[in-house]
Amino acid sequence: MNFEQAQAAYLNRCAPGHRTRRVRWSGGTTQVIELGEGPPLLLLHGGLGEAFQWGHLLPALARKHRVMAVDRPGHGLADPFDYQGVDLLQHARRFLGDILDAEGLPSVPIVGSSMGGLWATDFALTHPQRVPRLVLVGSPAGVTRALPLQMRLGTVPGLRTLVRRMMSKPTRDSTRAFWAQLLVAHPERLSDEFLDLATESQRRNTPSWFTLIDRAFDVRGMKKNLLLADRWKDLSVPTTLVWGEKDAWATPELGEAVAAMNPRVRMVRIPDAGHGPWFDDPERVVEAIEGALG
């Protein structure tokens, strides 16, 4: 079974009735996974992730929304993408603007995770008229320069080649270990089916991922030009941070400090949850998202 077939089988079980289609943007084509018929809601996954990671959240959100989960370039079933020499935030604005235009959406609430959270926040800062509500699930990239040790190792000369050789040959066990270290508080709840699908995505997309890592990180952590820093004060869009208390990338106290900078930003903690808190506590995360959307 190839990656596309495996994704379809997985989504048929966790999000029955879903629809997938290709969408063209100015840099290629990508995949949108859609469920529901209500007002539109865009889901934007994190770095080294995929749209299907939202799969088990889609039915709950689709009760009130037409939910669209999009693969970012070089991820999931999007076209491969070379990030060498690319201005990441300018690229993010172009991609999101193109997707909204292709979907005929003057504006849409965005739920973003991790790197997707950085992209969505920058887009809301530069195009506030197109983002009526913003929800950031898991610590957004750009909130701190610090990185987990496992990510920094992949930027260290000498170790970099070894780490990337291992990443290019993922297994179910290596994928589970990565998720346990960096993404969830309860890796034992991840199904073998999901892990096998994530493994196939990694096998397909590592060439694109490596170029993204090189543009976003160096041995000191997140590159300075990607840090949001005081830009949080300028965010005019009502924004909710949904933060796992066991997030390996940044502590919830950092999120609370961000919320204290801007009265339009509020913070929701998810106990006993990691960087992808919807895997650890989907009910609370759905409740937080729906509360943020009003």
Image: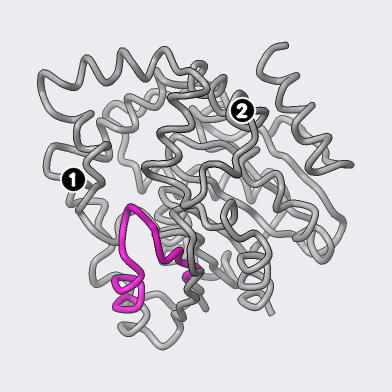
Image-quadrant location for residue 134: bottom right
Asked if residue 255 lies in the magenta stretch, the reply is: yes
Who's the residue at 20% across and 53% down the image? 146
Q: Residues within 10 Å of mark 2 (few under 14, many from 20)?
A: some
Q: Position of residue 138 (x, y in %)?
A: 46, 59
- Mark 2 — residue? 29
Stretch of the chain drawn in magenta: 241-258
86 is higher (above) or lower (below) than 265: above
Alpha-carbon span between mark 2 and mark 1: 30 Å
Residues at discs 2 and 1 in contact (Cβ within 8 Å): no
Front in this rendered view, residue 193 or 24 = 193
Q: Disc 2 marks which amino acid? A: Thr
* Picture residue at 48% right of the left edge, 32% below the top: 176
Q: Quadrant of the C terminus?
A: bottom right
- Which x, y percent locates residue 9? 79, 27
For the point 45% across and 50% down, the residue is: 93
Residue type, label 1: Gly
Colour pattern of the rendering: one colour
Towards the viewer: 150 or 2:
150
Name which quarter of the figure residue 220 lies in.
top left
**Relative horizontal placement of residue 284, taking residue 183 as reference (left or right):** right
Label number found at residue 221: 1
191 left or right of 241 in image? right
